Image: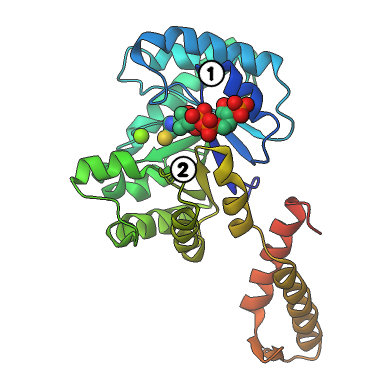
Amino acid sequence: MDRLRRTMLYVPGSSTKMLEKGKDLDVDSLIIDLEDAVALSQKDAARETVVKALNEIDFGNKEKNVRINALSTPFGESDLKEVIKAKPDAFVVPKVNRAEDLLQVDALLSSLEKENGLAPGTISLHAMIESPHAIVNINEIAASTKRLKAMLFGAADYTKETRGKITKERLELLYPLNKMVLAARVNGIDAIDSPFFDIKDTEGLIYHTNIVRNMGYDGKSVIHPSQIKPVNDIFTPTKEEVEFAKKVIEAFKQADEQGIGATVVDGQLVERLHAEAAKRTLMIAQRAGIV
Ligand code: COA
Ligand code: MG
């Protein structure tokens, strides 16, 4: 885990007001958007707004990501060339269908890093997984480049392509969501869920988020300030979970020292695997600043 990504907030790159607001919101990452949140007529102006915002606004410890337009559009290459000057942490690549889509961005970034005096590999990548092709090719995409730190599911584009429907229960998305988290785990990168589009429906947001939390997802994209706290809460260990994790680590350590492989904490079986999971819980809690 290179950093926490419990909440990744989309901010339209064309909105100076929302960009400024973004600096005070309690999210782990920002996804400053030049793609679908920006009208075609505003692409060039938005790019300038984003460069200015990255240069002038202090976003603190938040991860600063910029979602570019695909390289197959007239805007993608200029997005990379101009925005790299303001040194974002990562670019989010939309509509990745196969490994080559990322490798193309990776190669262009390598030459742009050189031109801009940045060490090779300074800028990371995140891939949007939002098509049937992406799900079919997920393993090669996840393994394609060392720059890749996270895959972000995009439910709206995915559902448009499958001609399906997003439901309250999310059963239609269990297959792609599970397939994506497996590829993320195999390749040591983060799996981030799609946004939830009904801003007023907090109960629905929590229901959808718990599904992916239980699958192993690391975080969720959000689109509105009201979605931040519910999602952060789900991806942050509770006080009880932290206390239990500490007990598990200690009990396993003592058992291990006595040559015993399994013990019991609060009526629960504890083996090495539980101690390892507990260490991860503590690490997330530490990074979240709650211990
Ligand atoms: N980032 C930062 N600030 C945001 C925000 C966001 N994504 N969404 C809303 N805000 C701000 C608003 O500017 C407003 O600020 P104010 O109180 O200082 O005026 C406040 O939060 C409340 O917003 P609200 O009035 O409820 O919503 P809105 O009508 O201004 O905006 C959306 C609604 C959907 C247009 C807006 O949330 C948005 O653009 N979200 C991101 C969309 C996006 O990036 N899509 C691409 C990926 S799917
Ligand atoms: Mg999309």
Residue located at (59% from left, 45% from top): 228
> CB at mark 2 closer than 8 A to ligand 1?
yes
In the rendered image, which quarter is residue 246 located in? bottom right
In the rendered image, which quarter is residue 71 located in? top left
- Kindly identify the amino acid type of the residue bearing the numbered disc 1: Ser
Residue located at (70% from left, 91% from top): 263
Q: Quadrant of the C terminus?
A: bottom right
Residue located at (70% from left, 14% from top): 56
Left or right position of 77 against 30: left
Q: Mark 1 — residue?
A: 15
| Badge 1 element | loop
Residue located at (39% from left, 53% from top): 180
Q: Which mark is residue 169?
A: none
Question: Around disc 2, counting alpha carbons within 10 Å, would you say few (fewer than 14), some (14 to 19), or many (20 or more)?
Answer: some
Q: Mark 2 — residue?
A: 199
- Kindly identify the amino acid type of the residue bearing the numbered disc 2: Ile
| Badge 2 element | loop
Q: Are marks 1 and 2 in contact (CB under 8 Å)?
A: no
In the rendered image, which quarter is residue 244 located in? bottom right
How many numbered tags mark residues here?
Answer: 2
> CB at mark 1 closer than 8 A to ligand 1?
yes
